Amino acid sequence: MLRECLEPFILAKTGTGRTALCHLKMDGLSLTLAIVCLAPTSVSITWLRMRENDVITGTQQTTLLVTSSRSRIACARTCSVLDWCSVFAADDMARTCELRDLPRISLNFSSKSPYSSRWRLLNEWCPVNNGFYFSASIHFCFTMVTNLNATWTESRNECIRRGLDLVVLDTTLKLKIVLNIIKNTPGGTNYTYYLGATRPMADIGAVWKGDKKTFEWINGANLSLSNDTWAVNQPNNYGGVQNCLVVEGPDCALINDLDCYEHHSFVCEKSEPRR
């Protein structure tokens, strides 16, 4: 009898407690009890199928709920044999397996990825269904904001307002990912994007008389870019006040220095939550 009361909640997608009415007969007495059935919290764990240096983005194209798979191992095996399956969400308590297809942009970089497993946990903090890009190889989450034009300071404030910050491209792989996404996204090269790097000075509107290639990322890292990353004859610090770094979409998605008070689009990055 107790099993009949609990089972609907044990098999539920979410493990919230609910009240069930159970009819109990004891020694000829009929008694109806209201029992709060508290099932352990059912957690759906999402795993990403690893394909070297792929970046996933966009809304789900296909979702298939498999109820016969009773373990995450069986769920992974089912996803592995389907070419379209890139993500599975295994819920051990509910005994369900959700197979998903998220569009992948294969960038085919030469850099080796640090992962060593065929599957990796996909954190839900990167909303790939809402305009974000996620690189599993380096756990990099970012979005391009093209519906706003702002100064560098305004751009950073808007990123922060969203719980993000201007993107920091302090590794070769992060730089390649952002530049390639801009190149491969329809309309991506129509915009100029502020990045999270400026001259190392308190007043970004002041005149800079130092090395034209001297910039600093907002996390304190020094800028280090190869010559083929810069636009032609850049950086040139025109007028002595081009103190902010941008990606020039219309100029082959290359790096340039511009006046921080110009109005442009920008790229925001989401940092992993501290554990």
Image (cartoon, rainbow, N blue to C red):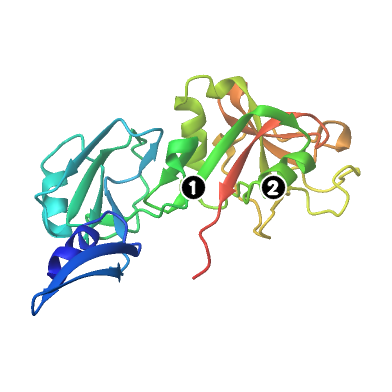
Q: How many marks?
A: 2
Task: Point out residue 68 in the picture as x, y percentages from the top left corner.
Answer: 9, 50
Picture residue at 37% right of the left edge, 50% below the top: 136
Quadrant for residue 55, please give it.
top left
Picture residue at 54% right of the left edge, 24% below the top: 188
Any part of residue 67 in sight: yes
Q: Point out the residue furthest to the front here.
A: 28
For disc 2, the neighbor class at 10 Å (few under 14, some 14 to 19, many from 20) is: few
Q: As drawn, is 186 to the left or to the right of 17? A: right
Picture residue at 46% right of the left edge, 44% below the top: 127
Q: Quadrant of the N terminus?
A: bottom left
Q: Amino acid at mark 1?
A: Cys
Vertical relation: 231 (above or below) 158: above
The one nearer the camera, 84 or 41, is 41
Q: Which residue position holds label 2? A: 161
Q: Amino acid at mark 2?
A: Arg
The one nearer the camera, 101 or 198, is 101
For disc 1, the neighbor class at 10 Å (few under 14, some 14 to 19, many from 20) is: many
SS type, badge 2: helix
Q: Point out the residue furthest to the right here.
A: 206
Task: Point out residue 214 in the picture as x, y percentages from the top left corner.
Answer: 73, 49
Picture residue at 71% right of the left edge, 35% below the top: 235
Q: Give residue 141's mark.
A: 1
Task: Point out residue 59 in the picture as x, y percentages from the top left corner.
Answer: 39, 33
The one nearer the camera, 221 or 38, is 38
* Alpha carbons under labels 1 and 2: distance apart: 17 Å
SS type, badge 1: strand
Vertical relation: 227 (above or below) 263: below
Any part of residue 6 in sight: no
Q: Earlier in the sequence, mark 1 or mark 2?
A: 1
Quadrant for residue 3, please give it.
bottom left
